[in-house]
Image (tube, rainbow, N blue to C red):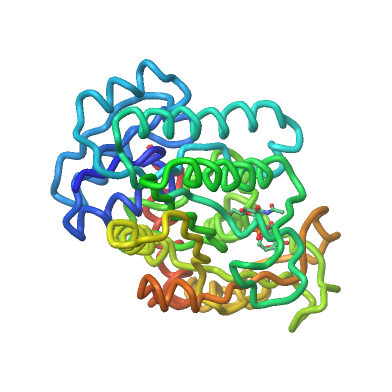
Amino acid sequence: MKVLVTGGAGYIGSHTTVSLIENGFDVVVVDNFSNSKEKVLERLKTITNKEIKCYKVDCCDYEELRKVFVNEQIDAVIHFAGYKAVGESVRLPLMYYQNNLDSLLTTVKLMLEFKVNNLVFSSSATVYGKPKSVPIYEDFPLSVTNPYGRTKLMIEEILADVTKANSFFKVAILRYFNPIGAHESGLLGEDPEGIPNNLMPYITQVCIGKLPKINVFGNDYDTIDGTGVRDYIHVMDLAYGHVLALNKLSSSKDNYLVYNLGTGKGTSVLELINAMQEVVNKPIPYEIVERRPGDIDCCYANCDKAFNELGFKAKYNIHDMCETSWNFQVKNPKGIL
Ligand code: UD1
C-alpha cells in the first residue's frame, strides 16, 4: 500500500513516515519545506534504510500536486500539511484560513479525482476548546478560541460533509493531545524556528543554555500544583496511531471515524520540568509568570475509543519522552542543519 504523506518532513509527519515504513507501507512525501528542512529526508533514509520519494510541492498548488497523483499509484493519504502556531494565527488569520483550508481542499479534490478513498487527517485536541470536564471524550462539544483551532474544526466539518456526499470516501480524524519526544536515534525531533511556543522545546532549549529560564504560565489553576495540566504523548506512539488508523479505514464500514490520541494521563508543567531535571541531572531554572491568554487549566484524553477500535495504547512514559527530546536537542544544538 502506497501512502502519500503531506507535510512528511515536519515533526509529526517525519516520525509517522518512519512508523509507516517499519510497518510495511510505501511512502511518498510531499512538503514545501515552509516549516521543515530538506535534510529530514536524508535522515529518514538513514533511519529506514530506504530512499523515500519526496516531491517539493505546496499542497495548495493544484497543478503541481496533480502531477504527484499522476506519477504515483497512491492508495491513501495522511494529511499533515498546514500551519500550526496559535499566536501567529491570531495575528495572521487570513494566512491560516487560506493555507490550511486550501491545502486540504486541493488534496481532497485530487483524491476524489484519482479515486484515492482513504484519508487520515491530523487534527488537534484544540477542537475541544475549554472542555466541561476531563478526561475528554470524542463526543464532547466542540469549540475553538483561535484561527488555528478554527481551521482544524472547519476541516473536520468539511470532511464530514464530503463523507456524507461520497459513501466510498473514508476519513479518520485523529485529535492529538500534546506530542513531545523524538525518534530514539536523535535524528528526528521537534525543530521550531526562533523561540519555541510550546513547552517541551522551550525546556530543552533552557537545558542546553540557549534560553535563560522557563516561564511557567500561571500557578493558580485548579490543578495538582496550580500549573497547567496536559496529556503529553510520545511522538512515536502518535505516529503508530496513524498506522492503526489506516488499517482501520481499510476494514471499516463507517466512513467517518474520530479518535483521541493521547495517553489518558495528565502531567503538570512543574511535573514535566521535574521529569526533565532527572534526565539532565541538574536543576532547571524557571519562574512563575502571568497566565498565557487563551490557556486552559487541564486537558487530557479518554483513549478508550482508540484502544477498543484501533488497538491503540501509548507505550512510552514521561521519562521516555523527556529522554528522547533531550537526546534530540543535544545531538542538534542548532536544530536540523
Ligand atoms: C498548544 C496550542 C494548541 C496546539 C498545541 C500543539 C495554545 C493555547 N494551544 O497547546 O492549540 O494544538 O500547542 O502542540 O497555544 N507553558 C508554560 N511555559 C511555556 C510554554 C507553555 O508554562 O513557555 C505551559 C502552558 O501554559 C500549558 C503547557 O505548558 O499549560 C503546555 O503548553 P504548550 O506546549 O504550548 O501546549 P498547549 O497550550 O497545550
Residue drawn at the location 68% of the way across and 44% of the way down: 150
Quadrant of res 327: bottom left
The reply, left or right, for residue 212 in relation to residue 178 is right
The extreme bottom residue here reads: 224
Please state the horizontal and vertical placement of residue 238, each as a whole percent of the image. Answer: 42, 62
The residue located at (25%, 46%) in the rendering is 44
> Residue at position x 36%, y 34% from top?
111
The spot of residue 143 in percent (x, y) is 74, 54
Eyeballing the image, is 202 above or below 91? Answer: below
* Front one among 224 and 156: 156
Residue 152 in the image: above or below residue 264: above
| Residue farthest toward the top in the current orientation of the protein | 63
Q: Nearer the viewer, residue 249 or 27?
A: 249
Left of 75 or right of it: where is 200?
Answer: right
The reply, left or right, for residue 127 in relation to residue 113 is right
Q: To which quarter of the image does residue 115 belong?
A: top left
Q: Quadrant of residue 28?
A: top left
Quick one: 154 or 58, which is closer to the camera? 154
Residue 217 is left or right of residue 253, and the answer is right
Say if residue 182 shows up in the picture. Answer: yes
- The location of residue 45, given as percent across then percent down, is 20, 44
